[in-house]
Image: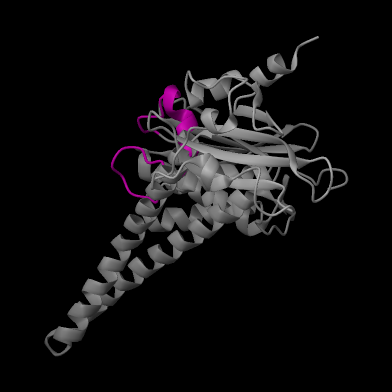
Amino acid sequence: METAEGVLDLLPDGVVIADADGVVTHLNAAARRLLGATARTGAPLADVMALQDEDANDWATTVCPYGGLSTRSGVPEMTWLTRSGAEVLVTARLHREQRGGPVTEVGVVVRSGRGRERLDRDRSDLVATVAHELRSPLTGVKGFVTTLLNKWDRLSDEQKKLLLTTVHADSERLSRLITELLDVARIDTGRLPLYRRQLPVGPAVDKVVDSVRAGSGRRIVVSHEDPTAPVFADPDKFSQVVTNLVENAVRHGEGEIRVTTAVRGGRLGEVELVVDDEGDGIPEEIRRRVFTKFWKQGIRGGSGLGMYIVNGLAQVHGGSVTIGDAPSGGARLVVRWPGREPAGG
């Protein structure tokens, strides 16, 4: 049977436990690593928790775990600095044998601040990326509108139409980006509204492909094993998935694009949607990164959110997305989508 110290050593975070007299009775390996070599059992809690804030206030005096209101039961998580200058996050639980009585035991949890630093850095990167993506179309709109206002009388009707068409295109791009950002937030929080029903895969895919083909002029070949095969999906979200996949192939691929659907059976009568292009393909070592936010391949356009949304929408519908190699050497993206509602769903 493992000892209490042995069990505590299995925990990833540092744990320090002190008795009613403020003497440390338990100290795990993670706590020793984070707090330094002087951290040991039998020492005063104030000495073991030799931490300071940015104003040089020490932990024990500031927190005062054995003082304060008799109703206190814990200390919220705060950031502190160790002797070596490393940032740690510390929280504490104050145990009282009797309600309103003195503190009889203090349990402290110490964890590295690196995780929070990484989270803060990721958030900063996200804000910077979003700001950059929003600024690009807004700059275009502002510039062309300014030109129209300042030179209206000197511009011909054709020039005005060209400028307004460009403004419209930039505003549409901005609207799509905002919609994608909202979808990302809803996928992340599990609050994406879905209105699922069965719909035939053939017409749903053909409608999207016709629209992309008209806007790009690329040769897109479509074939269906059974165009009446049902997919169980929110029609708008399914169209969004197909649109992102085909537009991604247009943006990053070369030559002909092939879109095929086939029935693959399975418990929910799955339908498989395959999009092949004739580009350079996606190296196997970076395929997992394709489904991360703001991932972009090369220098070509796009917000970098399309594949993240494709993967998220497929998963909330009970489907999946995988990346492989097309017969032509380009990229192959395969979406498996349930054909009917799960029992009890």
**Which corner quadrant of the image does residue 310 belong to?**
top right
Which residue occupies the foreground of this view, 297 or 6?
Answer: 6
Q: Give the residue at x 72% y 59%.
A: 195
Relative image position of residue 201 (x, y in whole percent):
66, 48
**Which corner quadrant of the image does residue 343 belong to?**
top right
Q: Give the residue at x 62% y 52%.
A: 189
Residue 60 shows in the view:
yes
Number of numbered labels in the structure image: 0
Q: In the rendered view, does 333 fall on the left or right side of 120?
A: right
Q: In the rendered view, does 259 fall on the left or right side of 56?
A: right
Residue found at the far top of this picture = 1
Answer whether residue 276 is magenta in the image: no
Relative image position of residue 193 (x, y in whole percent):
68, 59
When the figure is inspected, residue 200 is found, relative to residue 3, above or below; the finding is below
Residue found at the far left of this picture = 154
Quarter of the figure that contains the N terminus: top right
Relative image position of residue 174 (x, y in whole percent):
39, 64
Q: Give the residue at x 70% y 57%.
A: 194
Which residue occupies the foreground of this view, 117 or 127?
Answer: 117
Relative image position of residue 208 (x, y in whole percent):
53, 54
Type of colouring: one colour
Residue 219 shows in the view:
no
Residue found at the far right of this picture = 344
Residue found at the far front of this picture = 21
Identify the main secondary structure in magenta: loop
Q: Give the residue at x 79% y 38%.
A: 268
Which residue occupies the foreground of this view, 319 or 20?
Answer: 20
Answer whether residue 282 is magenta in the image: yes
Write the start and end of the magenta stretch as one range: 278-303
